[in-house]
Image (cartoon, rainbow, N blue to C red):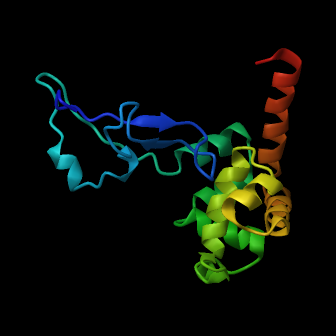
Amino acid sequence: DDDGRMRSGYNVGATVTLRWSSSSGAFGTGTNEQNITNEMRRIFIADPGWMLAYSDLERAESVCLAYLAKDEPYKSALRAEDHHAMVAAMVFGINPKDAREPYIPPFSYRDIAKRLAHATDGGGKPRGLARTLHLPEEVVADFQEKYFNRFGGILAYQEEIQERFRVRGQ
């Protein structure tokens, strides 16, 4: 902006996977800060007396959910080098090494598992997710059934949260 600062707007639940996204700010300036590469970060300079820090919170949402839900199989999946491939293997019954194989073009098993897991964790339902992701509703429903069968703690946690809002409004 004119004052030399970078600004962005943050959108809650605006993505297909129900995660936060960022984009240009309210006045049309700025950018999606989540796409700024490490090389680009060098152009940012802290004000005198301040420091800039960057932390990659990879898996943070998933780890928080796993522990809040007390879901041991999900915690185990998150310890894998590629947890999206591990979730794909657990849900689709494939070898994790095959998770990047095509499933529904242009998506691999891993792609579908990643998108649907995040969206399912956020409370997405088959009809809406199928429409948004351009997938057959049966694929989404089948994924969610298998996902919740494998990671039952997540479903129980979601139901607990829904009950809290229903009963106490909090």
User: So how many labels did they put on this image?
Assistant: 0
Q: Is residue 94 left or right of residue 63?
A: right
Q: Quadrant of residue 31?
A: top left
Tell me which residue sits at (63%, 83%) in the image.
Answer: 102
Quadrant placement of the N terminus:
top left
Q: Residue 9, percent across and down?
A: 42, 35
Tell me which residue sits at (68%, 70%) in the image.
Answer: 88
Q: Is residue 166 left or right of residue 29?
A: right
Q: Nearer the viewer, residue 21 or 27?
A: 27
Find the residue positioned furthest to the front: 27
Q: Residue 106, percent across and down?
A: 60, 78
Q: Is residue 168 left or right of residue 6?
A: right
Q: Nearer the viewer, residue 47 or 130?
A: 130
Quadrant placement of the C terminus:
top right
Q: Residue 64, percent across and down?
A: 61, 40
Indicate whether 126 appears above or below 113: above
Q: Residue 113, percent across and down?
A: 67, 65
Q: Is residue 145 left or right of residue 132?
A: right
Q: Quadrant of residue 53?
A: top left
Find the residue positioned furthest to the top: 168
Tell me which residue sits at (38%, 40%) in the image.
Answer: 24
Q: Nearer the viewer, residue 114 or 105?
A: 105
